[in-house]
Image (cartoon, coloured by chain):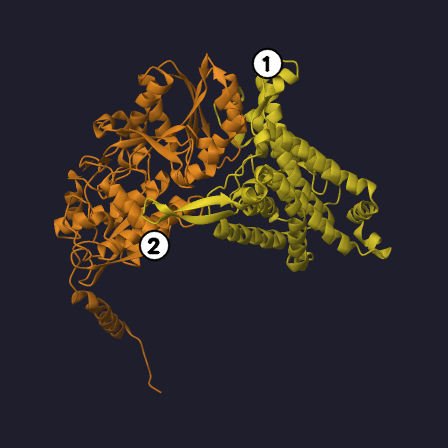
């Protein structure tokens, strides 16, 4: 029972990352009709925004020692962080909480990157077939990840969670189970809550604001909204920016869980496309529901007992695709897909 | 306008003339005794390392080492470990009087790409020797290609038992240690520190290196009294190991062995620490984590999670012997950072190849192989070392290391806990973990 609860928690946690990325993908597909394979790269760039902020906050003053030398005989470098020099304990606290500070940088940076990506490249492919869009965005993703590798190297760069949120917490005791039965990392709980907040925020934005209402109307019938004199293209461009921000935030907050590396976007991208397809192309609730569903399924499939049911076969590596095949066979439009989307 | 008419007689005459013309250059040239026999001016070495893909940083460090080795062989710089090497055949005038040139290839950490780049270096650039690594799958694939092409392969970082076990080749040589040696060196230290009554849970990367690493460390720890509770294979492409770590919490295990390398190691270790495994008490003992193969470059990726965790390594820049210090000084002055174990083994392999050619007095792969077989040397950073003829594996001391609690610099991540003597990690060439293959015959190629 404890093991099952633990895997549900794990699945929800994985699922929240899938859901956030899939939400951004669906926002873009639903509004602009573009299949954006560069979306994983946005997740990765969001993560590297955190690396940049952490790097800036951790800038060091380097002085050369007059007495000591390093192993190859040159004067030893003595390094002290400027944040600590200038602000003392508060400076250290700033560095410690750099993940949260980075969110302030991620929002404008990703908004700009998203808008630049849409205006600079993707808008030229609106009227082209989906295959062209996939090729050009996939190419863009490769270019972006190579740039990041060139700047930051190929090895993962660790971004620890703040000290206070680094350990694990006894969820079992909190749920009234035997103490120590379910130990779960605090940061993963933080990530889950953060994802719920962002998902809730996006839905509220679309549901309760005039901007959101126009966007939803545009998603349903772009032509009619245009005939009403509304510049829907401008709003859709803004939605691309917002989708980039959502994905960037997902990447930034994920850094203490997965040390950022240039390839992390690609690792998530394929899974998230499966999530979008299973959820139903263009359906926001579908993307979120499918994200959590597939996250939980993937977690369960990696349990030894579940593998034993499949004669030891590594079911965890194929479960998502297997479920996708079954769902698409029984519900060709996905769980919550709308009629007419990607259908000619 | 001339009237050209083709009949059978003129066609045969014409074809004969063309054929003789095409054959002429090879009639008057000397047949080569072996593949890519170098001319009198220079000799080309092929450095096949991951320049893109997940191991690109390790590949870049390997390339630095190769370039430094070439510099030293050609008489440049401070000479590095040429000054400490027990064999004095090399004198800084290249190899057999020829200037050393090199070409590089990008393995991308993919077997097919690595074979393609090695083939291009041999066929297009005339490389007489191929060296490089960072993945056992890649090393085994390239080693087999070099055997067929008739050139020597000096393996870089490859740790699978299979490289000099079931997949060994007469033209292939490995200086780096292997999974068996890691197990044999680590197990006694683990038993001494953590006791003999332990229950281990293994997470293993699902490919050749992971399998042999799991088999080796499992056998070595079980011999010391440990019990293996479970061994789970994880996909190489996995990034989030939380769902594999969770069952460990509910098992009866009190040790987690991570048979992972590179990004796998960084992520699984980070996940394990986040799940509070290191603070956990099981069976009245502190829960422990072990990483059998450590890499400083990759330990950096795991940050402070490596603190206090035991593993093994082929070489470490903090070693105090004269050869290691000379190499660190040489490399540090050139590149502003200490060399990694991958860089060390690549540098050493280049010197060993050059020395073998020099001693053999020939670039013929079969003569070089003969000079390397059962060659005993010292002064290259690992103490007394034997290149065993039976399987082309180097035998030397193995370092047991631990993540340092209070690092003094960004490079100061591991501390050497014990230097395990060579005798303790020796095994017979027909040991079951290495059985199933044979060196075969040396192939000189053309």
Q: Are marks 2 and 1 on the same chain?
A: no
Q: Which chain is yellow?
A: A
Tell me where residue B231 sits by quadrant.
top left
**Callout 1: SS:** loop
Q: Is residue B396 visible?
A: yes
Q: Is residue B109 left or right of residue A122?
A: left
The foreground one among A174 and A54 is A54
Q: Chain of mark 2?
A: B
Rendered location of residue A157, percent (x, y): 50, 42
Residue at image point 19% right, 36% down: B384
Q: Is residue B111 left or right of residue A153?
A: left
In the image, farthest residue toward the bottom: B1
Q: Is residue B317 left or right of residue B52?
A: left
Packing grade of label 1 (10 A; few <14, some 14-19, many >=20) is few
The N terminus of chain B lies in quadrant: bottom left
Examine the rendered structure and indicate whether residue B197 appears above or below residue A131: above
Rendered location of residue B367, percent (x, y): 15, 47
Packing grade of label 2 (10 A; few <14, some 14-19, many >=20) is many
**Callout 2: SS:** strand
Residue at image point 34% right, 29% down: B212
Q: Which chain is orange?
A: B
Q: Chain of mark 1?
A: A
Q: Which circle, 2 or 1, is nearer the viewer?
A: 1
Rendered location of residue B215, percent (x, y): 35, 25
Disc 2 versus disc 1: distance between alpha carbons? 57 Å
Question: For mark 2, what is the residue?
Answer: B104
Question: For mark 1, what is the residue?
Answer: A179
């Amino acid at each position: 029972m404890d093991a099952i609860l633990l895997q549900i928690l794990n699945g929800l946690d994985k699922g929240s990352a899938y859901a956030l990325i899939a939400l951004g993908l669906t926002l873009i597909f639903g509004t602009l009709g573009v299949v954006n394979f560069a979306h994983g790269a946005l997740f990765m760039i969001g993560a590297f925004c955190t690396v940049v902020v952490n790097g800036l906050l951790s800038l060091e003053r380097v002085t050369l020692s007059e007495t000591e030398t390093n192993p190859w005989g040159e004067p030893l470098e003595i390094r002290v962080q400027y944040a600590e020099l200038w602000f003392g304990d508060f400076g250290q606290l700033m560095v410690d909480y750099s993940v949260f500070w980075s969110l302030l940088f991620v929002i404008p940076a990703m908004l700009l990157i998203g808008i630049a990506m849409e205006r600079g490249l993707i808008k030229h492919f609106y009227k082209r077939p989906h295959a062209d869009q996939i090729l050009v965005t996939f190419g863009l993703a490769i270019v972006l990840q190579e740039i990041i590798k060139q700047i930051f190297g190929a090895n993962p760069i660790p971004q620890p969670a703040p000290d206070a949120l680094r350990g694990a917490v006894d969820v079992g005791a909190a749920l009234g189970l035997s103490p120590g039965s379910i130990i779960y990392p605090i940061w993963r709980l933080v990530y889950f809550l953060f994802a719920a907040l962002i998902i809730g925020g996006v839905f509220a934005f679309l549901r309760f604001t005039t901007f959101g209402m126009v966007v939803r109307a545009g998603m349903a019938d772009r032509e009619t909204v245009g005939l009403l004199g509304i510049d829907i293209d401008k709003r859709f461009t803004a939605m691309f920016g917002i989708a980039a921000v959502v994905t960037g935030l997902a990447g930034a907050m994920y850094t203490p869980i997965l040390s950022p590396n240039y390839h992390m976007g690609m690792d998530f991208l394929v899974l998230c496309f499966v999530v979008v397809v299973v959820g139903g192309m263009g359906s926001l609730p579908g993307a979120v529901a499918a994200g959590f569903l597939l996250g939980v399924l993937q977690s369960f499939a990696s349990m030894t007992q579940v593998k034993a049911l499949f004669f030891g076969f590594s079911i965890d590596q194929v479960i998502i695709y297997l479920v996708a095949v079954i769902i698409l066979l029984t519900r060709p439009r996905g769980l919550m897909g709308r009629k007419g989307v990607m259908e000619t | 306008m001339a009237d050209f008419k083709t009949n059978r007689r003129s066609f045969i005459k014409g074809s004969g003339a063309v054929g003789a013309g095409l054959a002429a250059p090879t009639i008057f040239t000397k047949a080569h005794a072996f593949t890519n026999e170098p001319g009198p001016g220079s000799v080309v070495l092929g450095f096949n390392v991951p320049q893109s893909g997940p191991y690109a940083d390790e590949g870049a460090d390997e390339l630095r080492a190769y370039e430094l080795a070439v510099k030293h062989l050609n008489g440049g710089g401070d000479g590095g470990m040429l000054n400490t090497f027990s064999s004095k055949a090399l004198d800084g005038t290249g190899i057999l009087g020829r200037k050393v040139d090199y070409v590089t290839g990008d393995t991308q950490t993919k077997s097919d790409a690595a074979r393609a780049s090695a083939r291009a270096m041999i066929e297009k650039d005339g490389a007489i020797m191929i060296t490089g690594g960072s993945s056992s799958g890649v090393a085994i694939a390239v080693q087999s290609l070099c055997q067929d092409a008739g050139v020597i392969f000096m393996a870089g970082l490859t740790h699978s038992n299979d490289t000099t076990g079931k997949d060994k080749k007469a033209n292939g040589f490995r200086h780096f240690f292997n999974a068996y040696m890691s197990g044999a060196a680590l197990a006694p230290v683990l038993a001494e520190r953590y006791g003999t009554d332990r229950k281990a849970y293994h997470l293993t990367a699902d490919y050749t290196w992971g399998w042999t690493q799991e088999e080796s460390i499992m056998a070595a720890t079980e011999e010391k009294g440990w019990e293996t509770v479970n061994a789970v294979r994880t996909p190489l492409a996995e990034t989030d190991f939380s769902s594999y770590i969770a069952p460990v919490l509910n098992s009866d295990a009190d040790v987690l062995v991570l048979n992972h390398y590179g990004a796998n190691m960084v992520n699984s270790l980070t996940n394990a620490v986040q799940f509070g495994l290191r603070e956990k008490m099981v069976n009245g003992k502190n829960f422990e984590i072990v990483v059998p193969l450590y890499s400083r470059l990759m330990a950096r990726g795991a940050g402070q999670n490596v603190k206090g965790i035991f593993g093994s390594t082929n070489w470490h820049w903090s070693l105090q012997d004269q050869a290691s210090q000379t190499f660190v000084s040489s490399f540090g002055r050139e590149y502003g950072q200490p060399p990694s174990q991958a860089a060390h083994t690549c540098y050493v392999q280049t010197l060993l190849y050059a020395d073998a050619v020099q001693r053999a007095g020939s670039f013929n792969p079969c003569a070089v192989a003969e000079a390397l077989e059962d060659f005993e040397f010292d002064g290259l950073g690992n103490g007394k070392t034997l290149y065993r003829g039976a399987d082309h594996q180097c035998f030397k001391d193995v370092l047991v290391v631990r993540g340092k609690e209070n690092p003094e610099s960004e490079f100061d991540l591991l501390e050497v806990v014990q230097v395990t003597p060579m005798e303790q990690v020796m095994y017979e060439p027909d040991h079951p973990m290495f059985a199933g293959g044979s060196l075969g015959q040396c192939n000189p190629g053309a």
